[in-house]
Amino acid sequence: MNYQKIPDETIKRMPMYLRAFSMLKTENRDSISSSQLAERLGMSPPQIRKDLSYFGAFGTRGVGYPVASTADQIRGILKLDVTQKAVLVGAGRLGAAIAEYPGFASFGFDIAAIFDNDPSKIGTKIGKNVVEDIAKIDTIKSRDIHLAILAIPADAAQPVVDGLADCCIKGILNLSACHLAVPKSIKVVTIDLAMELGTLPYYM
Amino acid sequence: MNYQKIPDETIKRMPMYLRAFSMLKTENRDSISSSQLAERLGMSPPQIRKDLSYFGAFGTRGVGYPVASTADQIRGILKLDVTQKAVLVGAGRLGAAIAEYPGFASFGFDIAAIFDNDPSKIGTKIGKNVVEDIAKIDTIKSRDIHLAILAIPADAAQPVVDGLADCCIKGILNLSACHLAVPKSIKVVTIDLAMELGTLPYYM
DNA sequence: CCTTGCTTGTGAATGTGAACGCAAGCACGA
DNA sequence: TCGTGCTTGCGTTCACATTCACAAGCAAGG
Ligand SMILES: NC(=O)c1ccc[n+]([C@@H]2O[C@H](COP(=O)([O-])OP(=O)(O)OC[C@H]3O[C@@H](n4cnc5c(N)ncnc54)[C@H](O)[C@@H]3O)[C@@H](O)[C@H]2O)c1
Ligand SMILES: NC(=O)c1ccc[n+]([C@@H]2O[C@H](COP(=O)([O-])OP(=O)(O)OC[C@H]3O[C@@H](n4cnc5c(N)ncnc54)[C@H](O)[C@@H]3O)[C@@H](O)[C@H]2O)c1
């Protein structure tokens, strides 16, 4: 498949479509048209059609998109058809909330390990995981984990990331308020909630 | 001022610049060039220059951008030069983490109220705020609050938003995994961490 | 089997943002 | 006071993304 010319923006929207189709499935809908879906998601029908068409023809003309099979297709595209294991680094307030957040599981993610450097946290249990010592981070090499979620203070992030880079980590969701330097083979998504809120007063 | 033709993408980056300039100030730097800043932030120098130039000429040729005054300028543009009050709805795990997160204060935000509908949470104290009953949400009308942070389950979000719309709320940071229908006068930023993680396996 | 109605898929056009390259111009030193 | 070197500001070019409009084509019903 030629994924080369698919817009980044389209990839960013795919999880949203997946979530929508998963929800439609639980509602026992058989199919949905691009215009109905667009209304639900607050976007335009042509955008949805174009996005989905990059990956092939999923829909049926005159009818719409079949819910079950389209969901499966998107899952396959995003490689979410197999369980993706992730390691959580930082068992603080935000880390604990994430560890118990069911939203990751609904995308097929499994938070398979938690690390921290605080001795009082190491050994305690959060959800199904026991917090491990960050000094032993390289044990994830043999555990088939290629994603990381970072919920540690910004000034501690870069050294931890350097360590993760040596541990087969390919993708990082960074919740610290800082830019991370990584080799090109690693994809980083950084989100700082305060920064996102920072744009809103401008518009009022 | 003619803000009409300023790209949305530029506005999205302004908080990042503000954070960088604030940090430079604590490091006692007097000025920084676009290329040095670009390296810190992982972006290109021309992008930074173009972004800042939309709002006027902040820099000094041959030298760079003066740290203190540029920070003040950006703060003014984003309307973060005055304390912006925000209401937090949802005092669960994520809500509690947010309430105690100092990152908002560093942008000049003040989480001035917390609401929930769980009787066991109403009346308890989180940080400096006492959790109030969501039924009394309209009391924020008289408290000069125009921003809201939503940390409640997705299926409860829309009715709460409808209520907020009647309470002078102009901007919403939505952490629920759903699209919100709002009047055009309200700006919504939705972030679902699971969805953000959802794009990463595609690239590996 | 054919007709009708509806919705997809898609090339072309439009719009928007990023990158580039250079002239303008400030600071500093001679 | 004048020349030099560096960095900004900005017009232009290029790349990417969204929107549009319509032909293609499936389903259903007569
Ligand atoms: N709390 C929020 O709502 C919120 C929102 C947005 C972003 N953030 C960011 O997320 C990060 C965590 O926030 P938090 O509220 O959970 O903070 P926290 O202080 O409660 O937790 C941080 C955790 O990281 C651990 N830690 C520190 N250095 C470490 C290291 N080198 N290796 C491993 N673990 C280490 C600490 O022991 C602690 O358990 C911060 O960067 C913060 O800026 C938090
Ligand atoms: N926990 C995470 O890491 C995380 C990450 C991303 C997104 N989210 C989203 O954030 C939201 C909250 O997550 P959480 O982990 O804090 O859940 P939670 O169940 O711990 O907390 C939800 C809180 O909302 C309150 N609530 C429910 N309905 C309400 C209503 N109508 N009005 C006012 N309050 C109401 C509940 O009483 C509870 O205190 C969810 O939508 C979740 O999908 C959570």
Image: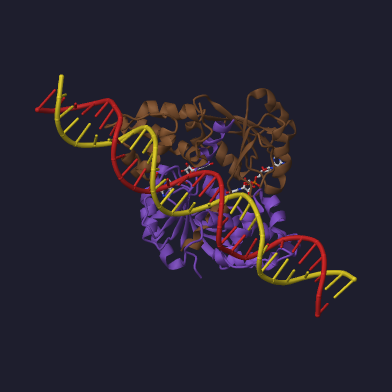
Chain colours: A purple, B brown, C red, D yellow
Where is residue A7 shown, x and y percent of the image?
51, 57
In the image, is residue A78 above or below residue B189?
Answer: below
Viewer-proximal residue, B110 or A101?
B110
Question: Would you say A17 lies left or right of A157 here?
Answer: right
Where is residue A204 shown, x and y percent of the image?
59, 30
In the image, is residue A72 above or below residue B192?
Answer: below
Question: Would you say A147 lies left or right of B40 here?
Answer: right
* Residue lying at 33% horizontally and 32% vertically, measured from the top left: B27
Q: Quadrant of residue A36?
A: bottom right
Viewer-proximal residue, D17 or B163?
D17
Give the number of callouts: 0
Residue A105 visible in rendering: no
Where is residue C12 shown, x and y percent of the image?
56, 57
Viewer-proximal residue, B196 or D22?
D22
In the image, is residue A39 above or below residue B130?
Answer: below
Where is residue B149 shown, x and y percent of the image?
61, 38
Question: Would you say A150 lies left or right of A10 here?
Answer: left
Q: Quadrant of ligand 2?
A: top right
In the image, is residue A201 above or below residue A58?
Answer: above
Viewer-proximal residue, B7 or B176?
B7
Residue A55 visible in rendering: yes
